[in-house]
């Protein structure tokens, strides 16, 4: 990764400047030595590839604790082997994207004390606002003749871009510069109590570097990026209020969330998520993982990952902000609503549970034991012939899809109880479906074997059985991940991510026919495509 992409995060870290960095650990004699140059380069590498699961301070969450008291026991050789080969517990192999020197340096780096990043004030955030297109110059109608409501927005992870793709014509419209390694893109959704004009027109991206970018799909390609603001140094998620007035961005570091004016990107309110967790212990690095707008209430749901709490934040009165804290389990990661938009189902992946909160009453209502480390991504809801409406998840820790009843009004006997457990070939990150599809699609990106990572598995809603394994790619260094359906559900798209040469336009998206499961086309020219988001699917909240 080019140095300029990581400047803001790197400048926030408090580091030693000596040529050889020696941390203050219990057994300093056992600590490996690193030059300042190697330490700096490895710090950036750790942030890009490791901090998401293990934490900036390395206290662990989805991944294991990597503080020196634990890593020194393993030593450089053993740690390097784990980084090289990955684990069956959901850690990828990195031998195909890191050099031996980088792996050796990472193994040394995680035996040293982690550098502590600086804080970020609201004044600094406000100074970071950049306007590329003034509001007065926003067009009053689309400046192109494309069907923008069937656009896909595709994350081009390591290049720090988002590609806009015409879903009708299967062609790339634009590559938009955003923050580094965008994790999520969101737009306003249809809301039962509030309305947004031109819904789906404006999209907001959250980069791993905490940069929040606003995109206007009505513009010509060269003007689609209209503004941006820095709300954190490390971040994951974003959401838009039901009335379209506010955007909320969640920080991994600093651990806080920021409410921003959706029109001009001016930060309005910052709330820290540091606090006492469900075990009664104070947590300094309590990161915000998932943020969602409640479809039926004027509020956001914010997950305080390490606290094991869901916070319901009512946004109508920012001066007297009302927040309800709901105790659930650790460590909260990603989730999705049931079809009614009342119940939010979120993975507490370190506890091997899906937690359920009721957005109408602002109460935690269920805790569902699943497999090892559930990870639904944007999730999937469907009708099971035995259980009625269900939700489902893949798992980071094992090859498994778990479904559970999620219709307490219509099927109370099955509500929040396991319906089926379906064994898959490998651990995965994403599961998706569409009401017009007879299938549920699961990827296997977290399995360490390349041939498993390169395939997706198709599950029949009717039988609960795997009916087909689709090998998406067989090219060395490439993996298949993240399914998204088009607007009418007639196609599903799967990303082919080149993990090794991610800064070259050699990634692609494979388009499949939903009914026949046959490949229709390959859209080429992407930089490391990962997640993708269809406008209609997202504004209608179709899972």
Image (cartoon, rainbow, N blue to C red):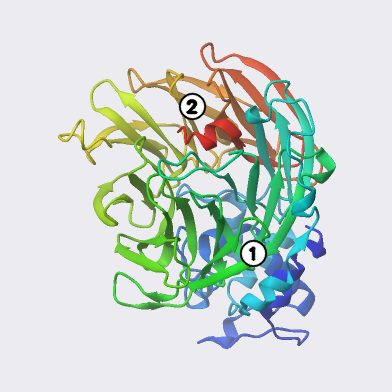
The image position of residue 67, as x and y in percent, is 51, 74
Q: Would you place residue 271 above or below residue 297 in this image?
A: below
- Of 371 and 14, the residue lying toward us: 14
Quarter of the image for residue 479 reads top right
What residue lies at 46% left-to-right and 63% top-to-bottom?
Answer: 64
Q: Can residue 474 be seen?
A: no
Q: Distance from label 1 to label 2 (Cα)?
A: 31 Å
Q: Can residue 505 be seen?
A: yes
The image position of residue 458, as x and y in percent, is 47, 23
**Mark 1 — residue?**
47
* Disc 2 crowd, CA 10 A, few/some/many (<14, 14-19, 20+): many
Which label's residue is closer to the chain start, 1 or 2? 1
Residue 457's tag is 2
Check disc 2 and report its element: helix, strand or loop.
strand
Quarter of the image for residue 174 reads top right
The image position of residue 98, as x and y in percent, is 71, 54
């Amino acid at each position: 990764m080019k140095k300029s992409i990581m400047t803001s995060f790197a400048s926030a870290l408090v580091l030693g400047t000596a040529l050889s960095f020696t941390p203050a650990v219990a057994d300093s004699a056992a600590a490996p030595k690193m030059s300042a140059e190697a330490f700096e380069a490895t710090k950036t590498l750790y942030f890009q590839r490791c901090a998401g699961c293990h934490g900036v301070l390395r206290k662990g969450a989805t991944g294991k604790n990597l503080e020196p008291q634990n890593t020194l026991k393993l030593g450089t050789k053993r740690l390097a082997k784990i980084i090289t080969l990955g684990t069956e517990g959901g850690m990828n192999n990195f031998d195909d994207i890191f050099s031996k020197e980088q792996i050796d340096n990472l193994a040394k780096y995680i035996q040293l004390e982690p550098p502590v990043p600086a804080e970020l004030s609201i004044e600094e955030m406000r100074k970071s606002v950049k306007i590329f297109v003034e509001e007065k110059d926003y067009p009053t109608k689309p400046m192109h003749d494309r069907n923008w409501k069937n656009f896909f927005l595709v994350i081009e992870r390591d290049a720090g871009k988002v590609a806009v793709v015409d879903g009708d014509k299967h062609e790339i419209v634009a590559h938009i510069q955003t923050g580094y390694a965008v994790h999520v893109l969101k737009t306003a959704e249809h809301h039962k109590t509030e309305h947004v004009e031109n819904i789906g027109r404006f999209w907001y991206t959250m980069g791993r570097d905490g940069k929040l970018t606003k995109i206007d799909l009505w513009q010509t390609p060269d003007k689609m990026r209209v503004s941006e603001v820095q709300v954190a140094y490390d971040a994951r998620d974003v959401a838009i209020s039901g009335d379209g007035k506010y955007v909320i961005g969640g920080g991994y570091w600093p651990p806080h969330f920021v409410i921003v004016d959706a029109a001009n990107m001016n930060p309005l309110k910052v709330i820290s998520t540091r606090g006492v967790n469900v075990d009664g212990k104070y947590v300094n690095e309590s990161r915000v993982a998932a943020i969602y707008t409640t479809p039926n209430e004027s509020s956001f749901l914010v997950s305080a990952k390490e606290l094991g709490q869901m916070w319901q934040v009512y946004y109508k009165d920012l001066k007297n902000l009302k927040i309800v804290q709901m105790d659930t389990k650790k460590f909260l990661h990603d989730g999705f609503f049931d079809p009614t938009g009342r119940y939010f189902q979120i993975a507490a992946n370190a506890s091997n549970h899906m937690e359920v909160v009721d957005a109408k009453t602002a109460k935690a209502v269920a805790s569902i034991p699943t497999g090892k480390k559930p990870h639904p991504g944007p999730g999937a809801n469907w009708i099971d012939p035995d259980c009625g409406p269900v939700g489902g998840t893949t798992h980071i820790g094992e090859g498994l899809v778990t479904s559970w009843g999620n219709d307490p009004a219509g099927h109370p006997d099955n509500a929040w109880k396991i319906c089926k457990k379906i064994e898959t070939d490998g651990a995965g990150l994403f599961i998706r479906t569409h009401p017009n599809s007879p299938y549920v699609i699961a990827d296997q990106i977290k399995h360490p074997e390349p041939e498993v990572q390169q395939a997706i598995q198709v599950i029949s809603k009717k039988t609960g059985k795997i009916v087909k394994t689709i090998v998406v790619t067989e090219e060395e260094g490439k993996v298949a991940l993240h399914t998204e359906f088009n607007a009418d559900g007639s196609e599903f798209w799967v990303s082919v991510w080149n993990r090794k040469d991610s800064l070259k336009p050699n990634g692609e998206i494979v388009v499949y026919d939903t009914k026949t499961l046959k490949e229709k086309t390959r859209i080429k020219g992407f930089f490391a495509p990962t997640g993708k988001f269809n406008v209609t699917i997202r504004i209608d909240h179709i899972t």
